[in-house]
Image: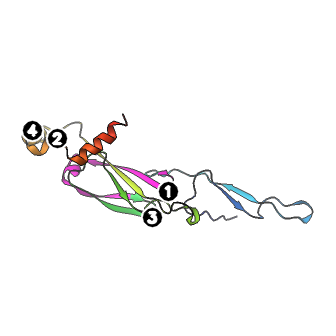
Amino acid sequence: MKVHIPAGVEDGMQLTIRGEGHAAPHGGVNGDLLVVINEVAHPQLQRDGNNLFHTRIISVMDAMLGCEVSVPCLDGSYKVKVEPGTQSGTVVKLRGKGLPSVQGYGRGTGDLYVKFQVWVPHKLSREEREALEKMKDSNSFKPDLTMEDKNTFDKVKNIF
């Protein structure tokens, strides 16, 4: 039998299909069929209620210079701009790109949160190292925390 699964159902929810259960004795009304939802995890998206979360690893160069990345979503992929100077741990919210509430009840449509993690290379060639050594003393490469950076670090330090 085909069963319509509404968008937004969560793991463990039950759907009741009236009259599709066991036949009743003596020509009575058939019982109901209960369908228990067993949600299969998405390989790149994690779910929390109606919100979705994705972690995207970017290179140091992309974090410093900025770029555009493709982010998976349930209805395809979306381009997200990585601003120049993006710090590891930065989260971007894509409003309304999460999951809908079941049959429109509840919190509306969730959001998709993309967390950027900056990957630092483990080894450099001699030429790469020399080029970076030349830039090392530039003021651009010395930590100078903005108020926004300080607020972010204050929030994160409480995690540890």
| Number of marks in picture | 4
The boundaries of the magenta stretch are 47-71
Front tag of 1 and 4: 1
Residue highlighted by disc 4: 133
**Location of residue 97 in the rendering, given as x and y in whole percent from the top left corner:** 43, 62
Q: Secondary structure at mark 3?
A: loop
Q: Residues within 10 Å of mark 2 (few under 14, many from 20)?
A: few
Residue 143, labelled with which disc?
2
Label number found at residue 75 = 3
The C terminus sits in image quarter: top left
Q: Mark 3 or mark 2, which is nearer the start of the sequence?
A: 3
Tag 4–tag 2 contact (CB < 8 Å) = no
Tell me the quadrant of the picture where the N terminus can be found.
bottom right
- What residue do we see at 80% from left, 60% from top? 31
Look at mark 1 in the image and give the residue it sits on.
50
Circle 1: residue type: Asn
Characterize the local packing of mark 3: few (<14), some (14-19) or many (20 or more) Cα atoms within 10 angstroms. Answer: few
